[in-house]
Amino acid sequence: MAASIRSKTTSQQSSNSTSHTVALPATVESGDTLLVIAGFDYNAGVISWPNEGTDWIQLTETLETNVHLSIAWKKADGTEDGTNITVTTVNSQSSAHASYAIQNAADPTVSAPELGGSLVTNSNNPNPNPGTCTPTGGSGDYLWMPCFTFGRSSTINSWPAVYGTGDESIELTVAGTHVGVVNRTNEAASEDCGSWTMAHSNAWLAATVAIYPATGAGQSPVPILVHHYES
């Protein structure tokens, strides 16, 4: 059985701060995979998650010009329903977040979510587009979650064609941050979702997260935190 979204929510840090309140979904069961996709305005500096490395594991912390992306996961213990966590940054910035409780996923401490080489950055265009995500476990019935963060408040004019409209979290400050996420299950060895089209051009980062099913696909290695900075 493929993994699927049990519940989801979005949240925003509307004013510049080094402390970002991230809402978690209302319904979370023990063993679920919690996944948060967070975009930060400009250079947030080092991004730190609660009890990072033990509870929360970052898949990436990446900067492109004037937008910063962090994706992190946690194996739920079942007490997280409707709660908030605090993510801290060295520099004071605004942020936007999309949070998911994922059911029927493989134990993430054994088969962790992967980006599968899909992280792409661009300094100025209107078409966020992750690269091809190729998980190390080979072909399987994955839950694919393409996502992006965009370096200003904007409007999504079109979504990746095979996904349709997804989940959108917009930080509506003057120098805001925009986050978009779509998801689908598809049995394959890789996934290339195509692009979004935004109403404006700006810097963006995009990636596809692959969630292993509870049975079937192989095991992934423990994720390594990636720091990637461009100016």
Image: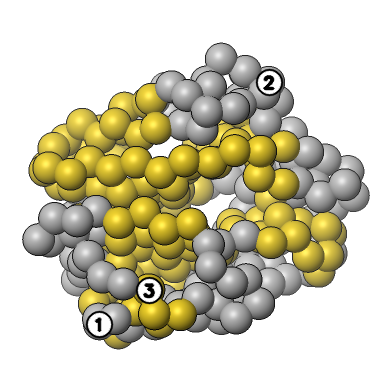
| Residue 56 makes an appearance in the image | no
As drawn, the label of residue 156 is 3
**Number of the front mark, 2 or 3:** 3
Callout 3 environment at 10 Å: few (<14), some (14 to 19), or many (20+)?
Answer: some
As drawn, the label of residue 201 is 1
Give the quadrant of the C terminus.
Answer: bottom left
Q: Residue at x 26, y 70 (%)?
A: 154
The amino acid on which the numbered mark 2 sits, given as a three-letter code, is Ser
Q: Residue at x 75, y 60 (%)?
A: 185
| Residue 51 makes an appearance in the image | yes
SS at circle 1: loop
Q: Residue at x 22, y 65 (%)?
A: 153
In the shown orientation, is residue 17 left or right of residue 54? Answer: left
Pointer 1 or 2: first along the chain: 2
SS at circle 2: loop
In the shown orientation, is residue 113 left or right of residue 179? Answer: right
Vertical placement of residue 45 versus 145, above or below: above
The location of residue 87, given as percent across then percent down, is: 31, 32
Chosen colour scheme: secondary structure
Vertical placement of residue 8 versus 132, above or below: above
Query: CB under 8 Å between callouts 1 and 3?
Result: no
Q: How many angstroms separate mark 1 from mark 3 (CA)? A: 11 Å
Query: CB under 8 Å between callouts 2 and 3?
Result: no
Q: How many angstroms separate mark 2 from mark 3 (CA)? A: 34 Å
The amino acid on which the numbered mark 1 sits, given as a three-letter code, is Ser
Q: Residue tagged by mark 2?
A: 30
